[in-house]
């Protein structure tokens, strides 16, 4: 076998299909985020990031930085081991207590990322609970899908956010058979939100456990920033809440929060928890500071809501189509992979605006989009520049506008 030729061909195919990913080389500027330096083919230039998942700018919050510097100076760089073999530091213990408190659960369990927490927790629970069948929302994240697949448990995929479809499947299963309903609160690409309470009603009626990915909601929704389940007053009804420390909390890491028994079970059986080095203590300390801050401060959440509403109104005023969802994610619909990439390239090169194009297979063909995430650290001037640039490029690209703005 000619290995090199195989790899080259596979990559060429990806390029031909328009699915080849190009990473922007960015350097976020501390204190000045969402501004960053971008190193492109023609040198370095200043850009404004409009697609970050550091939704609230916590990645540069003084409390978070002070906690991280403090821990680094106190304990050094790495944890030095797996959680089992010398890697459980006091900062990890404090973070798990903070997370359990945030979600009103008995316990929490920390992982190296949100991806790993989903993969390891779902993989372990579904594999170990005897005869478990997993009922998975059709738009669940890759990390959940991989975990469920890895478990080899029977898997049923129900129509996205469709309670009738979910109930039909639940009803058809024996009441006594163990069931795990896996879903998300805020879906990343469309920004729609699951009916969490109604799903918990069904789970109770049909004797199922619930597993909820709140990755795009933690820090963002609810009076203490615990997520949509907190906002909806149903946090106690969800068995396993999963989140990330890498998006609104601005650091890195993932976790589940649940009963002591469930956390202890996953801790004891999940390979993806056991056999990997613990997060650096400085990361854990930074996450604690971020969670503590967002528990008592609503300023960031309110600032963000305000920016999101502003941008939606500005897009409506010039007829640029976006999905009218109830969340903080603004998917601006282009509906063509080549134009989507072209707009994104022009935004970066000509307007100093960085928004990564979202094409197939991340979203279905024909729904290619720019996923815009306004944050409280975007200024009015940033917004003027973004709206002006989109208006220009929309015209150049001959993309349809909504009737309201058509002349
Ligand atoms: C980003 C994401 C994850 C993974 O979280 P990381 O901390 O980035 O690994 C899990 N679920 C959803 C829905 C996500 O969007």
Image (spheres, rainbow, N blue to C red):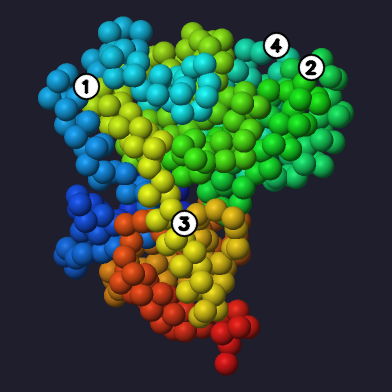
Task: Place residue 325 in its image quadrant.
Answer: bottom right
* Circle 1 residue: 78
Tag 4 near tag 3, CB within 8 Å: no
* Residue lying at 36% horizontally and 23% vertically, measured from the top left: 95
Question: Is residue 8 shown above or below 238?
Answer: below
In this view, the residue farthest toward the left is: 73
State which mark lies toward you, 4 or 3.
3
Give how far apart the Cα atoms at labels 1 and 4 are: 38 Å
Residue 398 placement (x, y as % from top left): 51, 83
Tag 1 near tag 4, CB within 8 Å: no
Tag 2 near tag 1, CB within 8 Å: no
Q: What element carries label 2?
A: loop
* Circle 2 residue: 177
Q: Residue 185 carries which label?
A: none
Residue 62 placement (x, y as % from top left): 22, 42
Residue 148 placement (x, y as % from top left): 61, 27
State which mark lies toward you, 3 or 1.
3
Relative side of 238 to 395, left or right: right
* Circle 3 residue: 305
Question: Is residue 319 shown above or below 296?
Answer: below
Tag 3 near tag 1, CB within 8 Å: no
Tag 2 near tag 4, CB within 8 Å: no
Question: Is residue 158 shown above or below 39?
Answer: above
Residue 275 placement (x, y as % from top left): 39, 14
* Residue lying at 55% horizontally and 28% vertically, measured from the top left: 241
Q: How crowded is mark 2: few (under 14 residues within 10 Å), some or many (20 or more)?
A: few
* Circle 4 residue: 130
């Amino acid at each position: 076998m000619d290995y090199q030729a195989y790899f080259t061909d596979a990559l060429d195919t990806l390029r031909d299909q328009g699915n080849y990913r190009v990473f922007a080389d960015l350097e976020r500027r501390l204190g000045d985020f969402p501004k960053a330096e971008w190193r492109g083919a023609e040198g370095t230039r200043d850009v404004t990031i409009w697609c970050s998942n550091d939704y609230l700018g916590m990645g540069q919050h003084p409390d978070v930085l002070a906690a991280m510097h403090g821990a680094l100076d106190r304990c050094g760089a790495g944890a030095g081991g797996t959680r089992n073999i010398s890697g459980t530091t006091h900062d990890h213990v404090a973070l798990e207590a903070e997370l359990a408190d945030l979600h009103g659960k008995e316990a929490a369990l920390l992982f190296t990322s949100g991806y790993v927490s989903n993969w390891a927790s779902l993989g372990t629970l579904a594999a170990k609970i005897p005869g478990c069948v997993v009922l998975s929302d059709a738009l669940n994240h890759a990390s959940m899908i991989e975990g469920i697949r890895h478990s080899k448990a029977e898997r049923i995929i129900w129509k996205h956010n469709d309670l009738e479809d979910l109930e039909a499947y639940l009803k058809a299963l024996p009441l006594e058979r163990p069931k795990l309903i896996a879903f998300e609160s805020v879906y990343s690409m469309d920004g729609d939100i699951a009916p969490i309470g109604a799903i918990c009603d069904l789970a109770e009626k049909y004797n199922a456990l619930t597993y909820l990915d709140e990755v795009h909601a933690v820090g963002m929704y609810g009076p203490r920033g615990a997520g949509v389940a907190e906002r909806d007053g149903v946090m106690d009804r969800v068995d396993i809440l999963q989140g990330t420390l890498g998006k609104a909390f601005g650091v890195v890491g993932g976790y589940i929060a649940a009963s002591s028994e469930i956390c202890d079970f996953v801790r004891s059986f999940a390979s993806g928890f056991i056999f990997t080095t613990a997060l650096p203590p400085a990361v854990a300390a930074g996450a604690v500071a971020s969670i503590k801050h967002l528990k008592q401060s609503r300023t960031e959440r309110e600032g963000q809501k305000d920016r999101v509403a502003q941008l939606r109104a500005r897009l409506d005023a010039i007829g640029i189509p976006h999905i009218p969802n109830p969340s903080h994610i603004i998917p601006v619909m282009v509906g063509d992979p080549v134009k989507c990439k072209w707009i994104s390239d022009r935004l970066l090169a000509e307007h100093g605006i960085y928004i990564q194009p979202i094409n197939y297979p991340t979203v279905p063909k024909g729904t290619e989009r720019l996923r815009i995430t306004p944050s409280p650290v975007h200024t009015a001037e940033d917004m003027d520049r973004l709206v002006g640039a989109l208006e220009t490029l929309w015209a150049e690209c001959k993309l349809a506008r909504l009737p309201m703005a058509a002349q």
